């Protein structure tokens, strides 16, 4: 276990998919069965424990949040919708006065809120409601001391995880500046489960890499500083705007594959370690034990998955690093990887590690991809909740892509769980075919 | 504006979806922004239906707003008819699409002669 497989980098490897063409580009029209960015509120409000997300939107937005979050009301949630009504649209009420009134009501009721996001939606975008101006006016208003920021989670502007990108990008201007001449620091960017974040920070600590900061922080009072000494590493592949604004504040990006699976996690940790001059021997000794555990945990699921084909429908932008993990560490055959957006620069390392010739598609038309799926009949289809049961009824085995967003899957200790998420549908289908006749094909 | 901390009340187009899913050979074309397709899961997951909801959404985005979204809606109607060949089609708009005033109700009249 001592021989660390050398990290294959874009430059060293002529193969891979970094220049691969895409089957369908998002410029193509057609229906996109994806969530809007408002959905990100569901995990962001859990991550930042003193933040509140107020959607300025329609009844549809409120319904989405309610049904997508599946909220049972045991406690007051830290999100809400200010529903735009007829009188707002007819100009009978001044929208900004209304926002001030609603925010006042909310803050009076919830003194625990320290950071309030005004979240734009499709209707607020279409009627051109200036939430930036509203946030500026309400920010740290005398008597409240509450930080007020805004971003858009509208489906017009954002797809699913891009809502997190927009929220984090809105936080960046609020980050304190690091002291002039500050020593280099590492910033992990992207919301991770607290337990995963702690594991990664411990590994960096053992290597002597640090100080380590995280964005988003768990409390708004712990905003990390940023400046030319900050080297940031993305933990999630969907943070293009956040990366751009961090760089306007002087931070530099550490390029790396994403920390999914053994290969991705090793590459990710190693990129940061190399940036901080960690000796190879120290890196090996720190990562050896967790890496060995991860290799064993992943190997347990290989018999169920090796040789099986799979197709990804677009969902979270995690598809490419996940396909890389499933192909390289579990021996799966990738039929097609669809992603809502393909950020070639941030995904360069993962694309280079994908088996050459993998079919990629960016924001494909759902009906046309379903045609390809029915023709290819992959052993496993990773798709959204609108497609999963219908495809199961057609005799296909499915994995709900949303689980990959809500489960802790990053890092060594989660690599086995990540593999298991893909193995479980096969086990389920195996059990079910024992108790019922084989499903009929075609609906 | 109305502060809503929780609500189980769906928008009316979800009611129209309920009608379309309850009938056979009916297809609903909904003018709606990207993201409104979340409503599919009310039927495929919560009701555990074994087929896709018979709904086609226009799923328009920012780049579409600069062009003719009414045309986008008409194309979606035509493509849905070609693909699903339903006995009857319903058309509608979600909250945001209504603000665009593309008037989906005017479209079927324009298309009726072309649909056998």
Image (tube, grey):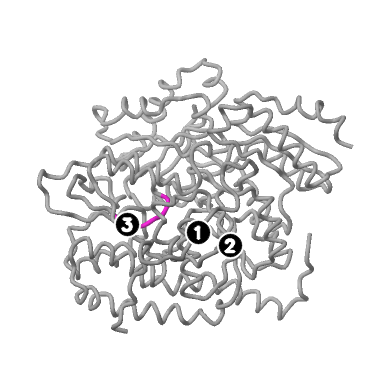
**Quarter of the figure with residue A188:** bottom left
**Quarter of the figure with residue B103:** top right
Q: Nearer the viewer, residue A420 or B7?
A: A420
**Quarter of the figure with residue A282:** bottom left
Q: Residue at x 51, y 50 (%)?
A: A69
Which residues are the magenta region? Answer: A233-238
Neighbour tally class for label 3: few under 14, some 14-19, many 20 plus, Cα within 10 Å: some
Same-subunit check for callouts 2 and 3: yes
Pointers 1 and 2 in contact (C-beta within 8 Å)? yes
Give the left or right position of residue A257, taking residue A230 as reference.
right
Residue occupied by mark 1 = A319
Provide the chain ID for the residue under circle 3.
Answer: A
Residue occupied by mark 2 = A382
First in residue order: circle 1 vs circle 3: 3
Mark 2 residue element:
strand
* Cα–Cα span, label 1 and label 3: 18 Å
Q: Position of residue B33 (x, y in %)?
A: 59, 37
First in residue order: circle 2 vs circle 3: 3
Outermost residue, right direction?
Answer: B116
Q: Position of residue A124 (x, y in %)?
A: 49, 29
Q: Residue at x 43, y 65 (%)?
A: A14
Q: Is residue B52 magenta?
A: no
Q: Residue at x 69, y 29 (%)?
A: B71
First in residue order: circle 1 vs circle 2: 1
Q: Closer to us: mark 2 or mark 3?
A: 3
Query: Label for residue A255?
Result: 3
Neighbour tally class for label 2: few under 14, some 14-19, many 20 plus, Cα within 10 Å: many
């Amino acid at each position: 276990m001592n021989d660390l497989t050398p990290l294959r980098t874009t430059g060293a490897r002529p193969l891979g998919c970094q220049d691969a063409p895409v089957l369908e580009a998002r410029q193509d029209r057609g229906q996109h069965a994806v969530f809007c960015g408002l959905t990100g509120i569901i995990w962001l409000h859990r991550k930042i424990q003193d933040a509140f997300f107020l959607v300025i939107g329609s009844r549809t937005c409120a319904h989405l949040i309610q049904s997508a979050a599946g909220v049972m009301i045991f406690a007051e949630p830290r999100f809400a919708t200010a529903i735009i009504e007829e009188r707002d649209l007819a100009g009978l009420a001044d929208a900004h006065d209304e926002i001030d009134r609603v925010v006042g009501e909310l803050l009076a009721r919830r003194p625990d809120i320290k950071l309030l996001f005004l979240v734009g939606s499709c209707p607020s975008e279409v009627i051109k409601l200036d939430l930036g101006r509203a946030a500026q006016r309400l920010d740290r208003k005398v008597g409240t001391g509450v930080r007020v920021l805004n971003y858009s989670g509208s489906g017009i502007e954002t797809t699913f995880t891009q809502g997190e990108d927009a929220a984090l990008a809105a936080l960046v201007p609020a980050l304190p500046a690091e002291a002039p001449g500050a020593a280099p620091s590492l910033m992990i960017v992207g919301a991770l489960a607290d337990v995963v974040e702690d594991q990664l920070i411990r590994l960096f600590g053992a290597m002597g890499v640090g100080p380590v900061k995280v964005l988003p922080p768990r409390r708004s009072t712990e905003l990390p500083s940023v400046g030319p000494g900050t080297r940031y590493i993305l933990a999630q592949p969907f943070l293009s705007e956040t990366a751009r604004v961090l760089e306007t504040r002087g931070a530099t990006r550490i390029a790396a594959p994403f920390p999914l699976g053994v290969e991705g996690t090793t590459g990710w940790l190693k990129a940061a370690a190399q940036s901080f001059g960690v000796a190879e021997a120290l890196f090996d000794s720190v990562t050896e034990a967790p890496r060995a555990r991860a290799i064993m945990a992943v190997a347990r699921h290989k018999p169920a998955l090796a040789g099986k084909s799979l197709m990804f429908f677009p969902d979270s932008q995690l598809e490419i690093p996940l396909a890389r993990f499933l192909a390289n560490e579990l021996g799966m055959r990738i039929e097609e990887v669809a992603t809502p957006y393909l950020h070639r620069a941030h995904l360069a390392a993962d694309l280079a590690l994908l088996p050459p010739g993998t079919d990629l598609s960016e924001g494909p038309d759902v009906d046309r991809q379903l045609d390809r799926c029915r023709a290819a009949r992959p052993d496993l289809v990773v798709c959204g909740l609108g497609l999963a049961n219908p495809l199961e009824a057609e005799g296909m085995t499915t994995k709900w892509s949303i689980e990959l967003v809500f489960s802790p899957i990053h890092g060594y200790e989660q690599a086995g769980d990540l593999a298991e998420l893909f193995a479980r549908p096969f086990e389920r289908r195996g059990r079910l075919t024992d108790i019922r006749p084989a499903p009929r094909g075609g609906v | 504006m109305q502060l809503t901390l929780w609500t189980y009340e769906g928008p009316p187009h979800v009611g129209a979806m309920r009608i379309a899913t309850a009938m056979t050979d009916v297809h609903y074309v909904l003018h709606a922004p990207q993201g409104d397709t979340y409503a599919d899961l009310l039927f495929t997951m919560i009701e555990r239906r074994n087929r896709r909801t018979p709904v086609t959404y226009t799923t328009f985005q920012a780049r579409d707003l600069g062009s003719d979204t009414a045309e986008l809606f008409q194309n979606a109607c035509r493509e849905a008819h070609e693909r699903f060949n339903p006995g009857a089609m319903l058309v509608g708009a979600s909250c945001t699409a209504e603000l665009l005033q593309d008037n989906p109700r005017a479209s079927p009249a324009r298309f009726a002669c072309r649909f056998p």
